Image (tube, rainbow, N blue to C red):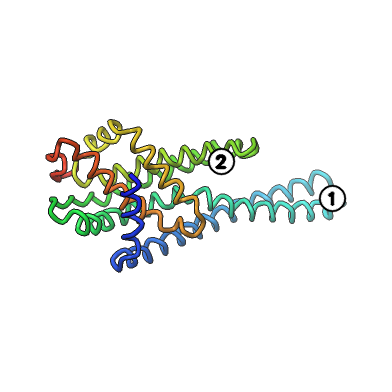
């Protein structure tokens, strides 16, 4: 597993990966900006509506304290957006991976497994669906874990473990679906659930590093291509023959 991670990291510096890196990072930044603007607009509207209601309820004399409260809330919301962006990175990178995963996997297969039959690219609709499902699950996990952040970091540990499970599941299935029908790829992931989860810890660790985590789609996909080759090929090389995905 460590060897697979090292291979994935090493290939990230090759010319083909640099091209994908620039595009995937650009897309991830655009998604984060759009999400940030959307969240800020919603919070600004709620703050304004709350200020109007409070002034109408408590009278014009409350304008000064309310203005101070609004400023404090604005600072809190700004910090919340920054922190939220950090915790939403697993969701964003999962979505980006669904768009670039096949291109990344193809380069890994050509570089490290040139004698093996190449995988078959996932239909774009299926790839996006898998990415959106994981992104939504990641957001739900963030919302569930957020209250626990107040309990001596328990929420951070909980979020890290959940992220490892989510991203391990997502990246392994994307790699496996290049060679197996969807149902079979998911069954293969469940059969090796423990190993896939431990591999997911590597990806969760990568996505937790600020700035560097923008490259998570490349590392996660390349890493899981190696893991799929290892797990699917154990005693059953016929599993590495690609089949059309439904």
Residue depicted at 29% across the width and 36% down the height: 189
Nearer to us in this view, 180 or 133? 180
- Please state which of residues 57 and 138 is positioned toward the viewer in this rendering: 138
On the image, the x and y values in percent for residue 63 come to 82, 54
Residue 144 in the image: state x and y as whole percent: 54, 36
Q: Residue at x 28, y 66 (%)?
A: 16
Residue 122 lies, in percent from the top left, at: 23, 49
Extreme residue toward the top, this view: 191
Residue 5 x %, y %:
35, 50
Q: Find disc 2 in the rendering and name its residue.
A: 156
For label 1, the residue is: 62
Q: Is residue 172 above or below residue 24?
A: above
Select label 1 or label 2 by which is in front.
2
At x 64%, y 35%, the residue is 151
Q: Which of 195 and 35 is in front in this view?
A: 195
Label 2: element kind = helix
Q: Which residue corresponds to the image point at 25% horizontal and 56% vertical from the top-left?
A: 108
Res 187 → quadrant: top left
- Judge whether residue 156 can be spotted in this image: yes
Work out whether residue 189 or residue 50 is closer to the camera in this orientation and state it. Answer: 189
């Amino acid at each position: 597993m460590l060897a697979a991670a090292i291979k994935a990291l090493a290939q990230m510096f090759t010319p083909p990966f640099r091209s994908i890196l620039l595009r995937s990072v650009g897309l991830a930044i655009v998604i984060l900006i759009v999400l940030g603007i959307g969240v800020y607009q919603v919070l600004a509207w709620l703050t304004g509506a709350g200020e109007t209601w409070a002034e109408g309820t408590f009278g014009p004399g409350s304008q000064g304290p309310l203005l101070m409260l609004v400023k404090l809330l604005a600072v809190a919301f700004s910090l919340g957006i920054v922190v939220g962006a950090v915790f939403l990175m697993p969701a964003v990178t999962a979505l980006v991976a669904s768009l670039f995963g096949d291109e990344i996997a193809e380069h890994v297969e050509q570089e490290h497994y040139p004698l093996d039959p190449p995988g078959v690219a996932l239909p774009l609709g299926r790839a996006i669906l898998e990415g959106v499902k994981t992104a939504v699950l990641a957001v739900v996990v963030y919302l569930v874990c957020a209250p626990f952040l107040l309990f001596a970091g328990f929420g951070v540990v909980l979020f890290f473990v959940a992220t490892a499970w989510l991203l391990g599941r997502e990246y392994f299935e994307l790699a496996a679906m290049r060679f197996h029908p969807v149902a079979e790829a998911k069954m293969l992931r469940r059969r090796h659930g423990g190993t896939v989860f431990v591999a997911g810890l590597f990806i969760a660790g990568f996505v937790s590093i600020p700035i560097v985590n923008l490259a998570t789609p490349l590392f996660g996909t390349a890493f899981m291509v190696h893991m799929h080759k290892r797990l699917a090929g154990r005693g059953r090389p016929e599993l590495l023959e690609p089949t059309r995905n439904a």
